Image (cartoon, rainbow, N blue to C red):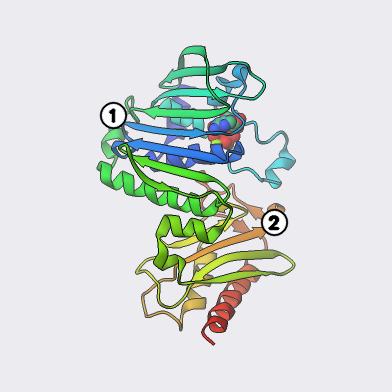
Amino acid sequence: ENTINKIAAGEVVERPSSIVKELIENSIDAAASRITIEIEDGGKKLIRVTDNGTGIDSHEVEKAFQRHATSKILNIDDLYNLNSLGFRGEALASIASVSEIEVITKTENDKFGTKLYLSGGSVIKKEPIGCSIGTTIIVKNLFFNTPARRKFLKPSNAETLSITDIINKICVGNPNIKFKYVNNNKIMLTTPGDDNLKNTIRSVYGKNIADNLISISTQNNYFKIYGFVGNNSIYRSNKSMQHIYVNGRYVKTTLILDAISDAYKSILPVNKHAICFLNIQVDPKSIDVNIHPTKLEVKFENENELYKFIKQEIYASLIHSSL
Ligand code: ADP
Ligand code: MG
């Protein structure tokens, strides 16, 4: 069982940023309105994610670290109606198998919170603790028991960049949540959590980007698209500033990236790429997010229509705004 977890960990837990992503997504699934992320040494020494979500019941805490333990799908139909970010019940088991973990959690039903320690996936200690409702998960000494994998980690500053990028993307995708990101005891970012996308973009990426956005809000029978696309005065030499969320989930789907490139073709200089922040809502039944464990790819039932719709709507907004 533990070997299986370590192998599975290779898929879900490539590097510190993938752990940060899984932990934040769990906090979002737990309906948190405040999430604080603290890292040290590029996440290799410490990752701590604290939320004010529902918490985990005292008698369920160990279960959360077992493989395929998920509280999010109860039957097979739920897989096709996926509203939560997690559903495989794999992340915590995988992370725990290659690190030392401390969990502090409390639900509104429990009088006391629970503190649980695990090392390499095994429970070391469980004790009651006084704390507020929500969950804190602390991941220490990543890959301490798989030295070969630890050696493969990039230098701390490179891992930090990757973590920062993921946090930025998640913040923008969740303007209703107040995020705080602390790196080596220094506050890197706070978002207002005021449910205003532009304010959130401003707090993450600054005034110049927030001031050069064109609003998009449109829908047809299948898709609803809303957010912002950059005008022709802001762009990048790669696609790293293309933020795409499908039903709230950050994705990197080739089809959508291509539609954006094609919409901007005659508008940006050659080899320059748009900046955008797009939310796409579709019937969860018409997408498949299960094709990759890190869940950045999504497959759409009506992909040709989606491509056309995105391209046409972005192009129309760009032309309209320049009139
Ligand atoms: P999944 O998210 O796919 O269900 P995980 O391994 O990420 O699987 O988490 C396992 C379970 O632990 C979740 O289904 C949830 O019940 C619980 N859990 C994890 N993190 C939190 C959190 N921050 N707040 C409340 N419950 C959590
Ligand atoms: Mg999860």
Q: How many marks?
A: 2
Give the vertical position of 22 relative to 96 (above or below). below
Contact between marks 1 and 2 (CB within 8 A): the answer is: no
Mark 2 Cα within 10 Å, few/some/many (few <14, many 20+)?
some
Quarter of the figure with the C terminus:
bottom right
Residue 118 place in picture, x, y as percent: 44, 19
Give the vertical position of 214 relative to 102 (above or below). below
Asked whether mark 1 lies closer than 8 Å to ligand 1, one says no
The reply, left or right, for residue 303 in relation to residue 139 is right
Mark 1 Cα within 10 Å, few/some/many (few <14, many 20+)?
few
The reply, left or right, for residue 187 in relation to residue 247 is left
Give the vertical position of 53 relative to 79 (above or below). above
Provide the secondary structure element on which disc 2 rests: helix
Kind of residue at disc 1: Pro
Question: Which residue corresponds to the image point at 59% horizontal and 80% vertical from the top-left?
Answer: 316
> Nearer the N terminus, badge 1 or badge 2?
1
Q: Can see residue 239?
A: no
Residue 84 place in picture, x, y as percent: 63, 43
Q: Can see residue 158?
A: yes
Q: CA distance from mark 1 to mark 2?
A: 42 Å
The reply, left or right, for residue 255 in relation to residue 302 is left
Question: Which residue corresponds to the image point at 61% horizontal and 65% vertical from the top-left?
Answer: 226
Residue to which mark 2 is pinned? 286
Give the vertical position of 57 relative to 127 (above or below). below
Q: Which mark is residue 147?
A: 1
Quarter of the render that holds ligand 2? top right
Residue 113 place in picture, x, y as percent: 56, 18
Q: Which mark is residue 158?
A: none
Question: Which residue corresponds to the image point at 68% horizontal and 58% vertical from the top-left?
Answer: 282
Kind of residue at disc 2: Ser
| Of residues 228 and 21, the one drawn nearer to the viewer in this rendering | 228
Provide the secondary structure element on which disc 1 rests: helix
